[in-house]
Amino acid sequence: MPDTLIPPRLTSLAHGGGCGCKLAPNVLADILSEMPLALGSKDLIVDAGTSDDAAVYRVNDTTALVATTDFFTPIVDDPYTFGQIAATNALSDIFAMGAKPIFCLAVVGMPVAKLPAETIRAILAGGQSVAEAASAPIAGGHSIDAAEPIYGLVALGLAHPDRLLLNSNAKPGDVLILGKPLGIGIYSAALKQEILSPAQYDEMIASTTRLNTPGTDLSQLAGVHAATDVTGFGLIGHGSEMARGAGARLVIDKAKVPVFDGARFLANEGIRTGASGRNWDSVKHLVTGEMTETERDLLCDPQTSGGLLVSCTPDAADKVLAIFAAHGHAGAAIIGRVEDGPAGVSVA
């Protein structure tokens, strides 16, 4: 395809966008139900067993290698911005483990007959800019000719084995802190319908391109027990994973959960993603409490490059919020607590 031709909208080439394309949790669980999770290596200290954000291999007593991969189809039409969002989202899993990213590999699938080379170059450049900002340069990668545009990263990081922020370490008595407002899935659905306002678009991009760098600092703070990043399964979905891993109950105060004002308005107007319904169907057996349909859609809204969900002692909460603020995450807020009880989520 000659570079002089006008390329189609990136989002028009994909059946869905961003983390909304993830397989629903129950579908993924069924697919993996008869597969061994790992080979039993004593040094593989985190595998898929607790649905954590990355795998972890112990190199020695003071060093662990943290590895993850994340990729998806376009959530926006601007190629450079798509690359930025995809890279920010992929690196989020490293930060959610409390690790420091070191380098990345690119995962690229592009419909080369439909997109000019300059568009693909812009996607890669956007991802490269984020990786370099995170001090994790892209050292290589792999590409294929694909039916839909797909971009993401394999991200690698380092951490101390004793300072990992596992999603399974939440403790009863902890408070829960969410680092970014919800509503990215609703914003992306409105963008695809061409009804997202310029101000809402700017809000969406500012959030999805903000690296979850607080995670690295939080791993050094006493009283921080667990973390995960809220992405395609929504707050309730990833909260349920944390609850199952910890064998405890997460209580979410829905009135305290930060939500973009524009996303709340759009949700009240009936804008939602198909993934929010799939997310709810996957976890509703683990959830108690009363919610309106709109509240449920927001709590199950698939987040692309969403915020960190942190479980910490109450006396560490102010320091956690200060770290979030220092990294530019001014919207971080206490949204609930962890209690003894059967694994699941209570919405209050």
Image (spheres, helix red, strand yellow):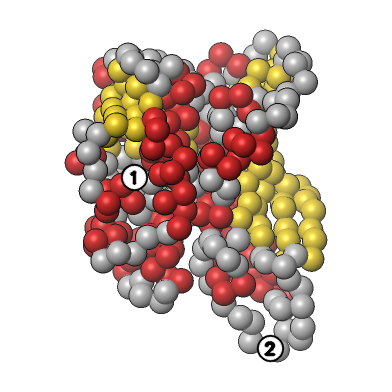
Residue at x-position 67% and y-position 10%: 61
Image quadrant where residue 35 sits: top right
In the rendered image, residue 310, in percent from the top left (x then y), is placed at 39, 29
In the rendered image, the vertical position of residue 315 relative to residue 21, given as above or below: above
In the rendered image, residue 216, in percent from the top left (x then y), is placed at 50, 30
For the N terminus, the image quarter is bottom right
* Tag nearer the camera, 1 or 2: 1
Q: Is residue 220 left or right of residue 161?
A: left
Residue at x-position 56% and y-position 33%: 53
Q: Earlier in the sequence, mark 1 or mark 2?
A: 2
Compare residues 183 and 25 and report the one nearer the observer: 25
Q: Secondary structure at mark 1?
A: helix
Image quadrant where residue 64 sits: top right
In the rendered image, residue 325, in percent from the top left (x then y), is placed at 32, 39
Compare residues 306 and 25 and report the one nearer the observer: 25
In the rendered image, residue 215, in percent from the top left (x then y), is placed at 47, 32
In the rendered image, the vertical position of residue 26 relative to residue 188, given as above or below: above
Say which mark, if any, is on residue 171: none
Q: Which amino acid, by three-letter code, is at mark 2?
A: Leu
Compare residues 154 and 23 and report the one nearer the observer: 23
Judging by the rendered image, the residue that carries numbered circle 2 is 5
Say which mark, if any, is on residue 299: 1
Disc 1 from disc 2: Cα separation: 41 Å
The total of numbered circles placed on residues is 2
Residue at x-position 76% and y-position 73%: 112
Q: Is residue 214 left or right of residue 252?
A: right
Residue 265 in view (yes/no): yes
Compare residues 280 and 224 and report the one nearer the observer: 280
